[in-house]
Amino acid sequence: AQSVTQLDSQVPVFEEAPVELRCNYSSSVSVYLFWYVQYPNQGLQLLLKYLSGSTLVKGINGFEAEFNKSQTSFHLRKPSVHISDTAEYFCAVTDNQAGTALIFGKGTTLSVSS
Amino acid sequence: GAVVSQHPSRVICKSGTSVKIECRSLDFQATTMFWYRQFPKQSLMLMATSNEGSKATYEQGVEKDKFLINHASLTLSTLTVTSAHPEDSSFYICSARGHTGELFFGEGSRLTVL
C-alpha cells in the first residue's frame, strides 16, 4: 500500500524567508503526488500535483515541488513566504487507479511570523 | 473549477442521536466519492469509498454500522453517524472524483457531540 511521510510536523519561518516542506513516499510502479493546503476549519485546496512529465511542478501562490524518483521525494518549496501562507500543508499520493483514494501524510504546520 | 459542497458545515448534537452529512458535486457527476475523518491537528484518515449504486467500501477499523454511507445518485453521497457519541466528534471531509480523474474536496463538516 502507498504511504507518505512528512518529515516535519512544524516549520516556523520568518516572513520573506524561503521554505521547504519535505515529503517522502513509498516506492511504487506508478505514483501520482499532490500537495494540499488547509486553512483553519476549512477543506483542502490543491496547491500542485505531479502526474507525469517535468519533474519540477509549479503550483498556485508561488509554490513549486520537485519529483525525485531516486530519492522517492516530493518536497514543496517557496522562495519567499508571506504571513498568509500560515496553514497546514498535506502531501498525498495515489496510484491513480480508478476508484483509488488519496493517502495523506500527517501534515506540516507552516507558521510564518514577521 | 469543479465544486463539491458539504452540508452542514457545522453541527452540534446530543449523544445518542444520528447526524447526516451531505456531499454534493455541484457541476459534475461523481461515480466515486471518498469520506475522510480528521481529528484536531492530525491528518485526514480515509474512512470509506462510496460508489454510486453500490455498497460503500470501508477501511479497516471503520464501523460500517456506525458510519452509514449512501451514494444514491451521481451527485450526492451522504454520511450518517448513527447513535453519535462524544468520541465521534471530528471534522469530516468528502471528496469526489471528476471525469478527468482529479479529486475535488468539500469544505468539511465539523461534528460536535455533547
Image (cartoon, coloured by chain):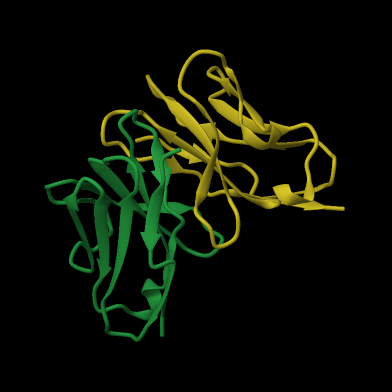
Quarter of the N terminus of chain B within the rendering = top left
Residue at left offset 41%, top offset 85%: B114
Res B7 quadrant in image:
bottom left
Residue nearer the viewer, A95 or B11:
B11
Q: Residue at x 33, y 80 (%)?
A: B85
Q: Colour of chain A?
A: yellow
Where, by quadrant of the figure, is residue A78 drawn?
top right
Q: Is residue A17 left or right of residue A71?
A: right
Indicate left or right for B53 with B101 as reference: left
Residue at screen point 73% across, 50% down: A84
For the residue pair B15 and A11, the one nearer the viewer reads as B15
Examine the rendered structure and indicate whether residue A18 appears above or below residue B110.
above
In the image, residue A57 lies at what x, y percent?
59, 23
Q: Colour of chain B?
A: green
What residue is drawn where x is 57% and y is 29%?
A74
Give the x, y percent position of residue B83. 25, 79
Out of A70 and A16, give the one closest to the viewer: A16
Q: Position of residue A12 (x, y in %)?
A: 77, 50
